[in-house]
Amino acid sequence: MNSDLELVLDRERKRYQLLLHLWRVSIGHTNKRVDLKDLGKSLGLTEAECMEVIIYLRNEGLIHGVSLGYTGAISHKGIVEIERTIKHPHQATEHFHVQVIQNFHGTVGAVQNSSNSVANINKVEE
């Protein structure tokens, strides 16, 4: 894979992970404010990566109400985007390529091969 594409997909992956985690923490409510820096830190993002992700998500209208303390909330547009990826995991959205959206239905493992790798695996019993 070309290194520019890898960079783009890595950035998209970080944005998707933060937005998905925010959706889960806020239970999909647009008025639940969350400390976005702490959320990013819990995903293994550096402070610089977290700031970059927050600014992108805010500029795209996927989060709103970001204060100087970096608390904010998921927007209606952000909820729609995440729920679309959950309902249609094999379709890209306006902001996320299909390679970034990963919903597995079976045994899953993860291999991290660099210090910047992040793997989040959530098991949902159905």
Image (tube, rainbow, N blue to C red):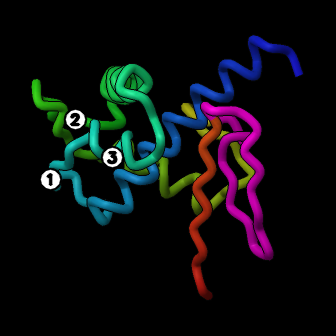
Q: Mark 2 points at which residue?
A: 64
Q: Report if residue 24 lies within the magenta region.
A: no
Rendering quarter of residue 60: top left
Query: Which type of secondary structure does the marked residue at label 2 adopt?
Result: strand
* Dominant secondary-structure state across the stretch colored magenta: loop
Q: Report if residue 112 lies within the magenta region.
A: yes
Looking at the rendering, the stretch of residues picked out in magenta corresponds to: 97-116
Q: Kindly report the distance in space between the C-alpha atoms of the residues bearing marks 1 and 2.
A: 9 Å
x, y percent for residue 24 = 38, 62
- Viewer-nearest of labels 3 and 2? 3
Q: Please state, as top left, top right, bottom left or bottom right, where the C terminus lies in the image.
A: bottom right
Type of amino acid at the residue the image marks with label 2: His
Mark 3 vs 1, N-terminal side: 1
Query: Which type of secondary structure does the marked residue at label 3 adopt?
Result: helix
Seen at 79% across and 76% down, the residue is 106
Q: Name the residue under label 3.
A: 39
Type of amino acid at the residue the image marks with label 3: Leu
x, y percent for residue 51 = 34, 23
x, y percent for residue 81 = 48, 46
Q: Kindly report the distance in space between the C-alpha atoms of the residues bearing marks 3 and 1.
A: 17 Å
22 or 84, nearer to the observer:
22
Q: Mark 1 points at which residue?
A: 31
Q: Is residue 43 above or below residue 126?
A: above
Seen at 60% across and 75% down, the residue is 123
